Image (cartoon, rainbow, N blue to C red):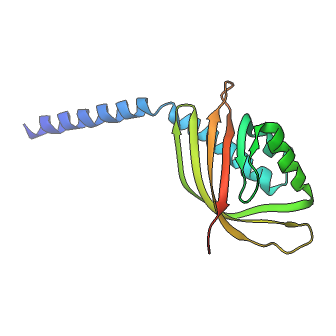
Amino acid sequence: MPGKLIIVITLIFLAVFAIAGEKNKGIKPERAKLLQTITDFYDAIENADYEKRISLFADDAIMMPNGWFVAKGKDEIAESIRKGKDAVFRLRDINRLELNISGDLAYTVNEYYYTYHNKGDEPDWKKTKNVHIWRKQPDGSWKLQVDIWNSTPE
């Protein structure tokens, strides 16, 4: 009898894991695609690749920078980002607090230090945090839909 019970329990566990695996089957590839897009976004910031960074925003995206005006749509966001070409914008110590995907939407919550200073000046690192909302596009790529950040008191 104990042998049959072990077999039944084993079969139940296998069935549960098979169902869970089937349920999450589509999430893992989407998570990998999203994580690559997020990496590309932060690499574009690190490498001052303004055009790559702009390309990762959805056409109808919204950017809400700390202490600045709301930029609506890719054209306004591009104008805002390109205005910063004479300055240095860098991030460090990025800590992802949360990442979640639900259907065609995903979000990340991050905290990090940033500097935005004139070229040639010493960096002035400030602690901040952001929320990014990502939306899957019809072609299957992920684009940044909402980019909002604000300072953290030190």
Q: Where residue 27 sits: x, y (%)?
A: 51, 35
- Counting from the top left corner in percent of width and height, residue 42 is at 73, 52
Q: Quadrant of the N terminus?
A: top left
Classify residue 22 as left or right of residue 138: left
The answer to whether any part of residue 57 appears in the image is yes
Residue 98: x, y in percent?
A: 53, 52
Q: Which quadrant of the figure has residue 107?
A: top right
Q: Nearer the viewer, residue 54 or 72?
A: 72
26, above or below 126, in the image: above
The answer to whether one can see residue 94 in this image is no
Residue at figure coordinates x 13%, y 34% from the top left: 4
- Locate the C terminus and report the quarter of the image it occupies: bottom right
Q: Is residue 120 above or below residue 25?
A: below
Picture quadrant of residue 18: top left
Q: Looking at the image, which is closer to me, 22 or 112?
A: 112
Task: Name the outermost residue toward the top.
Answer: 138
On the rendered structure, is 88 left or right of 129?
A: right
Measuring from the top left, give residue 86's x and y in whole percent: 92, 59
Q: Quadrant of residue 29?
A: top right
Name the residue at 24% across, 34% down.
12
- Give the left or right position of residue 102, taking residue 47 as reference: left
Identified at 67% across, 29% down, the residue is 137
